[in-house]
Image (cartoon, rainbow, N blue to C red):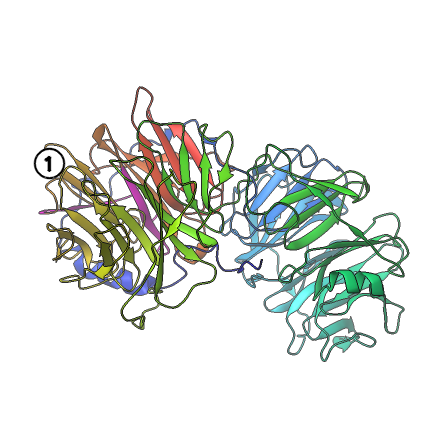
């Protein structure tokens, strides 16, 4: 199965920032803010955070093992930054302190100073001087934003660092600070996939062949490679002078000093596996004749090949076993392979990353087991806890679908029988029947204008398709409107009545459990809905619907969606929303620029509050949630446009007038917050779903 490299980037890209800020500026002086807005914020609140999701389930892009310590392993993610292990891959922890973005293109230890690690990401070049525990950005302009499929982009020669980036090849002198690139000629019309240094000469693997830097210019060194032009996906040099490369469609090659010699798979392997493309390459650190080659992650089948004679003969490595305690996903074995790495000081140990797991072998690659501890690498879009069963966690997860834990996060399994594969966006249990559940999906493969909805009558074990086609699939020409299904709500009184919101087509309703759907957008001036709980059916007010929109603010309907009216005045851009009914109806809505609006009277009047700290243009408030037993407690989570670092979580204990920061552990990357769920009880528990690092919880004292 092919998984899109873009499907996990669920949040807002770098869009509408300027337009939103202009609108906010226009109305800033016309609508009230909290009286103490701008004054010193309360001190931060510290909670006892605990990961409670599952490892695996996300794309791991690269892996590196320390040349001085085989127990030190660093793994990169496409959405979560870096994971670090100090026990050879048995357990991992995220290490995001200092990172400003989280798509990792390569990691490399500096050979002569192994305490130093260089990290190449989509927003710049980073350095760690403490073995990968903390990171400092050294050069923002040197980045790699392509989602697929890079390889070894960092290469060292003494104090020189060579980097393959979006802008070509750069060289840095690490003995000088600040880092400044030493001018290097441009490679004409080539996308850099990997770099290698052989006898001080830089070789670049590109989508148009191999080039070597000689006498101040790049010389085409593609002789012998198949393809017109040859697409070279990886290249590696060995200390003994061997140089190997991988051409995407024809496989493995060896450099003889003048041209490339093909070392293709034998006829029997070609006939058996019919590999369509190749990518990952690894060389034994002590024996250059021993190499590993893997198929390309965007083609099936997914196979690892091994050779002990420099590619003259090949065999497969097929023993990949999931730990019995691992989460039960659709990935039952090896998936799309990204990178293979030998442990330099313990070469019988290898690590491998794919689009679902990290794998470890301790016998030279003959047998592999998944690394399952601490590698939460998932996009959690929603979390539900069925009434009367606080230990059961049901999550809607990007790429994974519906994942269920019966024991408070100790074990997980997937329940997607009957539903399309892809990104689970939202789910909701019936208030009357705990076995009736509705699910909203954005599948990998979908038709234009089709909204994918499913119903379960057995608590989410199996699903029945109740999807529908929108009347007109044409979307407005707005950067922030994409047609995605975003929110689902079940009517609190009649559970055959279900509401679905979209980013572009507005709101839809069924009264018969999904047999017939109709649009309900009368009076809704901006049918662009996106944000956690941006559609709410208020349990204590039958018939009352609330929807938060991009451009029309908060809207209410008193007749189950037949008619809408805006109730938030000039606060026109709102994202996630929360409602708490008591003597009155308290509302909160997330806003751009780390702002929140709060109403204590059901939307008749609003106060806007700033979250503490700096308020850069690219950070917004996204998710908000009231404490179910104390409406004065309001928690807010932030997001960052363009998948950059957000600003974490905040809590108010006076109904949204003042906020204090909820401190996260320093190692946790500041990815965006997608979902917040607070459970009441003797010790209230807060669950937070993140965009990339899975699910965490903490007692909310």
Residue 64 horizontal side relative to residue 34, left or right: right
- Residue 578, image x, y percentages: 24, 42
Q: Residue 226: where, in percent of width, then height?
A: 78, 75
All told, the count of numbered labels is: 1
Question: Dot 1 corresponds to which residue?
Answer: 584
Q: Does the magenta run of residues contain 607?
A: yes
Q: Position of residue 429 (x, y in %)?
A: 31, 40
Q: Nearer the viewer, residue 558 or 237?
A: 558
The N terminus lies in which quarter of the figure? bottom right
Q: Is residue 29 left or right of residue 376?
A: left
Q: Quadrant of residue 635?
A: top left
Residue 70 covered by magenta stretch = no
Q: Is residue 408 left or right of residue 174?
A: left
Q: Left or right of 483: which side holds 374?
A: right
Q: Residue at x 39, y 45 (%)?
A: 673
- Judged from this view, the residue extending furthest toward the top is 682
As helix, strand or loop, the secondary structure at mark 1 comes to: loop
Q: Is residue 400 visible?
A: yes
Residue extent of the magenta highlight: 604-625
Question: Is residue 145 positioned above or below 669 on the image?
Answer: below
Observer-nearest of 211 and 490? 490
Q: Quadrant of the C terminus?
A: top left
| Residues packed near mark 1 inside 10 Å, few (<14), some (14 to 19) or many (20 plus) | few
Can you say whether 141 is above or below 186 in the image? above
Residue at the location (47% across, 62% down)?
Answer: 445
């Amino acid at each position: 199965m092919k998984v899109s490299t873009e499907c996990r980037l669920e949040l807002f890209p770098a869009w509408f920032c300027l337009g939103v800020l202009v609108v906010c500026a226009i109305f800033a002086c016309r609508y009230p803010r909290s009286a103490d807005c701008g004054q010193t914020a309360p001190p931060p609140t510290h909670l006892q955070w605990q990961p409670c999701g599952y490892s695996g389930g996300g794309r791991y892009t690269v892996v590196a093992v320390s040349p001085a310590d085989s127990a030190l392993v660093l793994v990169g993610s496409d959405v979560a930054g870096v994971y670090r292990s100090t026990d050879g891959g048995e357990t991992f922890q995220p290490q995001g302190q200092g990172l400003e973005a989280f798509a990792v293109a390569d990691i490399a230890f500096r050979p002569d100073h192994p305490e130093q690690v260089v990290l190449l990401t989509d927003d710049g070049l980073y350095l760690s001087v403490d073995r990968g525990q903390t990171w400092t950005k050294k050069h923002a302009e040197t980045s790699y934003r392509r989602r697929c499929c890079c390889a070894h982009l960092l290469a060292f020669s003494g104090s020189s660092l060579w980097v393959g980036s979006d802008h070509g090849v750069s060289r840095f002198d690490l003995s000088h600070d600040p880092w400044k690139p030493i001018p290097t000629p441009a490679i004409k019309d080539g996308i850099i996939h990997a770099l290698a240094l052989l006898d001080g000469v830089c070789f670049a693997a590109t989508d148009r062949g191999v080039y070597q830097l000689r006498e101040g210019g790049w010389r085409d060194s593609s002789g012998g490679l198949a393809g017109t032009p040859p697409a070279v996906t990886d290249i590696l040099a060995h200390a003994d002078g061997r140089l190997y490369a991988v051409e995407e469609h024809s496989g493995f090659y060896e450099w003889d000093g003048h041209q490339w010699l093909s070392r293709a798979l034998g006829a029997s392997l070609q006939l058996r596996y019919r590999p369509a493309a190749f990518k990952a390459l690894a060389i034994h650190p002590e024996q250059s004749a021993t190499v590993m080659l893997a198929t390309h992650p965007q083609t099936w089948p997914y196979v690892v090949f091994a050779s002990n004679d420099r590619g003259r003969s090949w065999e497969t490595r097929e023993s990949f076993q999931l730990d019995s305690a691992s989460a039960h996903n659709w990935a039952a074995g090896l998936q799309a392979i990204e990178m293979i790495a030998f442990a330099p000081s313990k070469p019988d140990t290898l690590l491998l990353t794919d689009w679902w797991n990290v794998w470890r072998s301790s016998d030279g690659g003959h047998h592999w087991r998944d690394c399952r501890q601490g590698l939460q690498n998932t996009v959690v879009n929603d979390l539900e806890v069925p009434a009367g069963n606080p230990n059961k966690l049901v999550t809607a997860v990007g790429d994974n679908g519906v994942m269920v834990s019966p024991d408070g996060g100790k074990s997980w399994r997937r329940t997607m029988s009957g539903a399309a594969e892809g990104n689970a966006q939202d789910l909701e249990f019936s208030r009357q029947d705990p076995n009736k559940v509705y699910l909203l999906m954005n599948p990998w493969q979908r038709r234009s204008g089709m909204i994918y909805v499913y119903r379960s009558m057995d608590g989410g074990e199996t699903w029945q398709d109740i999807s529908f086609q929108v009347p007109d699939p044409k979307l407005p020409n707005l950067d922030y409107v994409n047609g995605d299904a975003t929110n689902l709500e079940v009517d609190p009184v009649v559970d055959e009545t279900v509401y679905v919101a979209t980013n572009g087509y507005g709101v839809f309703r069924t009264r018969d459990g999904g047999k017939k759907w109709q649009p309900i957008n009368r009076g809704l001036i901006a049918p662009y809905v996106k944000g956690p709980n941006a559609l709410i059916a208020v349990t204590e007010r039958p018939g009352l619907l609330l929807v938060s929109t991009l451009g029309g603010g908060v809207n209410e309907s008193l007749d189950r969606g037949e008619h809408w009216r805006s109730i938030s005045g000039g606060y026109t851009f709102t994202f996630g929303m929360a409602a708490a009914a008591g003597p009155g109806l308290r509302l909160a809505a997330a806003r751009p620029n780390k702002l929140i609006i709060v109403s204590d009277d059901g939307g008749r009047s609003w106060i806007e509050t700033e979250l503490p700290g700096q308020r850069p243009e690219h950070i917004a408030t996204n998710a908000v949630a009231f404490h179910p037993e104390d409406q004065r407690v309001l928690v807010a989570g932030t997001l960052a446009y363009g998948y950059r670092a957000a600003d974490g979580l905040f809590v108010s204990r006076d109904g949204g007038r003042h906020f204090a920061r909820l401190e996260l552990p320093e190692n946790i990357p500041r990815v965006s917050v997608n979902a917040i769920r607070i459970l009441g009880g003797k010790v209230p528990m807060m669950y937070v779903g993140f965009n990339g690092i899975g699910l965490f919880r903490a007692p909310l004292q």
